[in-house]
């Protein structure tokens, strides 16, 4: 029954209750935001709830029928709700920023009074399975290489983008350099049908056709889901549909699944990470199709200790990377602490590459690529391959650097700290060669002198600089070179005859 508010009642408490904004995402799907309000005269308190996360209203007023709400989304980014109560309806303009530097984007909403609040709170956890070791799927004996849509396209990924990327990965020579997986990240999902089968949204009209297209280029294709009811982008997750979804992915012909914790974190405890990931790991094996299993849990729960047991081929070791030196630096340089957990079929994943996305210098992108190669990290390009500079392509396809990443011996890197923020990493390769990376993390170019004995090597006679591709003559017990700010000099020393 509709509640008709009189002006007097509305002025005092009429806003109290739950209001739901049912937003059209423009791809045939909808997402809900709940305004859980408590009005006391001109004061409005409460929270804004989306994806089961409540953000407290930090400023809330109601004067002469006009409402104004402010919530902090993250850091200094504020979302505001301004509008009028008109009879039973709130007519609102919502202003939000995607990041601190971007202008507000506005949406206009007309929402009816009081919602039941269904879907506002997380469901109860599902029972978790007993732990056991899921069979190894035998895939990715060297770190997976390919492309993922998220870092550049985020919610703008479409069927056309994926096809074009497949074309470009071939045309640019990236495929020949080893980039094989074309992975669709978040925002491909639609609703479920009456039998609970996951459907795609309007951006992906034919998943099977898309997989066939990518396979026709001798490439492989991946997609993304979450063990929670919602993905991080608020799209449909696999909660309670794990086995069914694994079968659907296999039926469409997919080869790779990234499985992102997201809303599962508001349902399960962190101690449930392993059994919850095991459930999908087992479902993928049972699907009968070889599917690479990528765990995305931001490095929580010491995943490197149990990732292989749940059938995981790679697992995120950190929060999300962004296209800034500070982000890449803080992620990349600390990974050496867990480098020993990388082994054939089971890889630490410090997140996807940002090379070519424009927020770092080419020297910084060389550092990014060098670190990922030394760490045997997955090399998943995250840029727009159609509009890529020659320098970007050269960084992504440097055969010598890729060979370090893909080296089958999987020796782990060692680090020596020099003066200031200069560090030298070394790694032995299967053929007995040694790579030496001199990293300058300081904000100015820096002459660096490294004594061979300092890094446990005997004086080599020659080396190849892998970024300039030049031969380097060496003599004496040390090597001096200027390393650009945030850059790296990467040398390969051939096996020395003893
Ligand atoms: C999380 C993941 C990202 C990306 C987004 C998509 O933040 O860590 O890599 O998949 O979700 O919503």
Image (tube, rainbow, N blue to C red):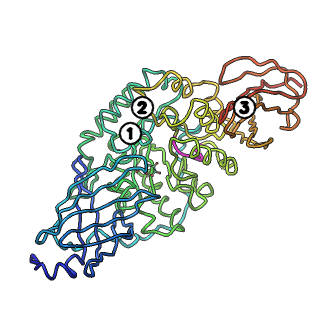
Residue at x-position 43% and y-position 23%: 170
Classify mark 3: residues with Cα within 10 Å, few (<14), some (14-19) or many (20+): few
Query: Which residue corresponds to mark 3?
Result: 430
| Disc 3 element | loop
Q: Quadrant of residue 119?
A: bottom left
Mark 2 and mark 3: span between their CA atoms?
A: 33 Å
Question: Which comes before the other along the chain, label 3 or label 1?
Answer: 1
Q: Is mark 1 within 8 Å of ligand 1?
A: no
Q: Quadrant of residue 228?
A: bottom left
Q: Nearer the viewer, residue 458 or 73?
A: 73
| Disc 2 element | loop
Classify mark 1: residues with Cα within 10 Å, few (<14), some (14-19) or many (20+): some
The picture places residue 179, in percent across and down from the top left corner, at: 50, 30
Query: Which residue corresponds to mark 2?
Result: 384
Query: Which residue corresponds to mark 1?
Result: 153
390 to 407, vertically: above or below = above
Answer yes or no: do the residues labelled 2 and 1 have beta carbons within 8 Å? yes
Span of residues in magenta? 345-352
Mark 2 and mark 1: span between their CA atoms?
A: 8 Å
Question: Which comes before the other along the chain, label 2 or label 1?
Answer: 1
**Which mark's residue is nearer the viewer, 3 or 1?**
1
């Amino acid at each position: 029954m509709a509640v008709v508010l009189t002006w007097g009642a509305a002025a005092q408490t009429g806003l109290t209750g739950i209001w739901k904004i049912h937003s059209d995402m423009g791809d045939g799907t909808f997402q809900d935001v709940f305004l859980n309000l408590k009005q006391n005269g001109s004061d409005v308190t409460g929270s804004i709830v989306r994806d089961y996360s409540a953000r407290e209203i930090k400023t809330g007023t109601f004067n002469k029928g006009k409402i104004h709400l402010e919530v902090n989304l993250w850091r200094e980014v504020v979302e505001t709700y301004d509008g009028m109560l008109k009879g039973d309806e709130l007519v609102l303009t919502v202003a939000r920023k995607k990041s601190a530097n971007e202008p507000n984007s506005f949406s206009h909403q007309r929402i009816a009074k009081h919602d039941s609040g269904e879907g506002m709170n997380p469901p109860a956890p599902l029972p978790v399975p007993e732990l056991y070791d899921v069979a190894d799927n035998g895939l990715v004996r060297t770190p997976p290489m390919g492309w993922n849509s998220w870092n550049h396209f985020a919610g703008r990924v479409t069927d056309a983008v994926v096809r074009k990327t497949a074309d470009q990965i071939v045309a640019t020579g990236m495929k020949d350099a080893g980039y094989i997986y074309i992975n669709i990240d978040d925002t491909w999902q639609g609703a479920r049908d009456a039998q609970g089968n996951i459907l795609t949204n309007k951006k992906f009209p034919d998943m099977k056709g898309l997989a066939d297209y990518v396979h026709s280029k001798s490439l492989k294709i991946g997609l993304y889901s979450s063990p929670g009811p919602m993905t991080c982008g608020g799209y449909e997750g696999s909660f309670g549909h794990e086995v069914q979804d694994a079968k659907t992915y296999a039926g469409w012909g997919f080869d790779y699944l990234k499985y992102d914790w997201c809303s599962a974190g508001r349902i399960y405890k962190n101690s449930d990470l392993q059994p919850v990931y095991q459930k999908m790991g087992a479902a993928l094996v049972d699907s009968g199709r070889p599917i690479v299993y990528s765990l995305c849990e931001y490095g929580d729960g010491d995943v490197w200790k149990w990732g292989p047991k749940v059938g995981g081929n790679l697992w995120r070791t950190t929060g999300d990377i962004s296209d800034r030196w500070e982000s890449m630096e803080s992620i990349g340089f600390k990974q050496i602490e867990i480098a020993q957990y990388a082994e054939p079929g089971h890889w630490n994943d410090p997140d996807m590459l940002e090379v070519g996305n424009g927020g770092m210098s080419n020297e910084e992108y060389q550092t990014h690529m060098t670190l990922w190669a030394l760490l045997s990290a997955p090399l998943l390009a995250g840029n727009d391959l159609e509009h890529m500079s020659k320098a970007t392509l050269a960084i992504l396809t440097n055969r010598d650097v890729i060979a370090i990443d893909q080296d089958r011996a999987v020796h782990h890197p060692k680090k020596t700290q020099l003066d200031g923020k200069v560090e030298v990493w070394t790694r032995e390769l299967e053929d007995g060669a040694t790579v030496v990376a001199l990293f300058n993390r300081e904000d100015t170019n820096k002459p660096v002198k490294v004594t061979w004995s300092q890094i446990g090597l005997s004086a080599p006679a020659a080396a190849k600089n892998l970024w300039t591709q030049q031969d380097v003559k060496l003599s004496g017990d040390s090597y001096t070179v200027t390393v650009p700010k945030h850059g790296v000099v990467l040398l390969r020393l051939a096996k020395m005859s003893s």
